[in-house]
Image (cartoon, rainbow, N blue to C red):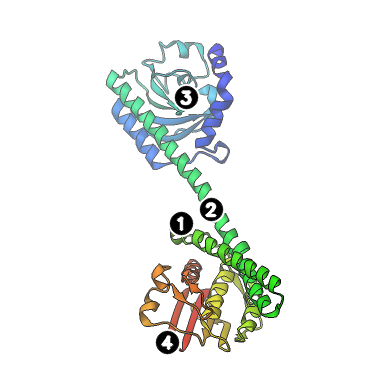
Amino acid sequence: MAEHLKNISANEQNRVKALERYENIEKGIQRDEVFDRLAALAALICNAPVAFIKLVGRDKQYVKASFGSEGSTMPRSAGICQYTIMQDDVLEIRDSLEHEIFKNDPNLPGPDKLRFYAGVPLKTPEGYKVGTLCVIDKTPGKLSDSQKEAIKTLADEIISRYELISVKNLLSEKNAEKDELIKIVSHDIRNPLGGIINFSELLLEELTDPDHIEMVKNIEKGGETILSVINLMLDSDYVRNKAFIVKREPVDVVKLTNKVIDLFRNALDRKNQKLIIQMDEQINGEIDKEMWELIVGNLLSNAKRFTPKNGTITIKLTSVVKTKKLLDFTIKDTGKGMPDDLLEDIYSGKESIIRPCTEGNESTGFGMFMAKKYVSLLKGMIKVSSEEGKGTAINVLIPI
């Protein structure tokens, strides 16, 4: 027996790493109904009362699935599966009283618990044997060739299932990385870039030197080009369909809102737009800070762009209590307004809603689409009312 164990020690470290790619042994084996059904199918095929899917760690054997018995974690040395993973084919013990392994290994179960055993190793695509599919009985038995082939096929199915789970987990990790990248682009790049563009526009009205004017125009143009690329990257099926993770935390929403408004003050002054702010002195609640900043930023940016010079933008922020405490935010402008047919597509992000702003450039409507998405993620409601030529009012209600 000792010699057999030495034979697997050379690749034992890699074998255990391969197992840990499937299961986090330290946190505990995760039971799965699909694996239980595969164990039940093995028992049915082999006419055995009990079947297990076991994972063999460095020092212990773990039950992943079972049929006919719950089983339990046991020392690796106390189970037959330690021998099964030493070979490529089915290990069949027709009668434990007559088999050499049981005669030489006193740590194995006695004949009152086990007389018949048949097991096949679970082999990864790289060739590492991480566990077994086995059937047992308290009476002697024998498998036919077709039964052996069937349980080998089931063993392959078990590994295939693990591989699918492994790929799914990897994709989840990659998607989490994409989420983080999108948050960085949305918050740490997009908003400051908008500030750079606004300050560039302000400088253009103050400068007189032609060379300086040309340089600032290049800054403004470069910023708008980068912003367009960012919007294009954000305007994807991934962003449209991905359910972002909401991270609520305690915050003074009034203070947070004023922080966003301050980014637009110079740009509003440049167009001589009057900004009326009506907010409670303080509103404390739990909200995702980054999502709220993007909601306010997108809506205020739209109001600025579609309101002409000397127009008025009014922001109201208060809290109301209905069935729960709600954040009540309204932004109203005296801008171009929207026709009824445009209102129907305002949240869609479709190219059909591209329209000219008062500044001569165009709006893609993506800001409104993202604002609606963030409001929905925060379990809130958004309502738009508009009259062409007279302005737009947008009301947002979000539980805090």
Name the residue that disc number 3 marks: 127
Earlier residue among tags 1 and 3: 3
In which image quadrant can residue 313 be found?
bottom right
Q: Could you say which disc has been placed on residue 387 in the image?
A: 4
Q: Quick one: label 4 or label 1, which is nearer the N terminus?
A: 1
Is 95 displayed left or right of 356 in the figure?
left
Total numbered labels: 4
Amino acid of disc 4:
Glu
Crowd around label 1: few <14 · some 14–19 · many ≥20 (10 Å): few
The answer to whether any part of residue 331 appears in the image is yes
Task: Indicate which label's residue lies in the foreground, 3 or 4.
Answer: 4
Q: Which disc, if any, is residue 178? A: 2
- What amino acid does circle 1 point to? Tyr
- Distance in Å between CA atoms under marks 4 and 2: 39 Å
Horizontally, residue 46 falls left or right of residue 347, namely left
Determine whether label 1 and label 2 are within 8 Å by CB: yes
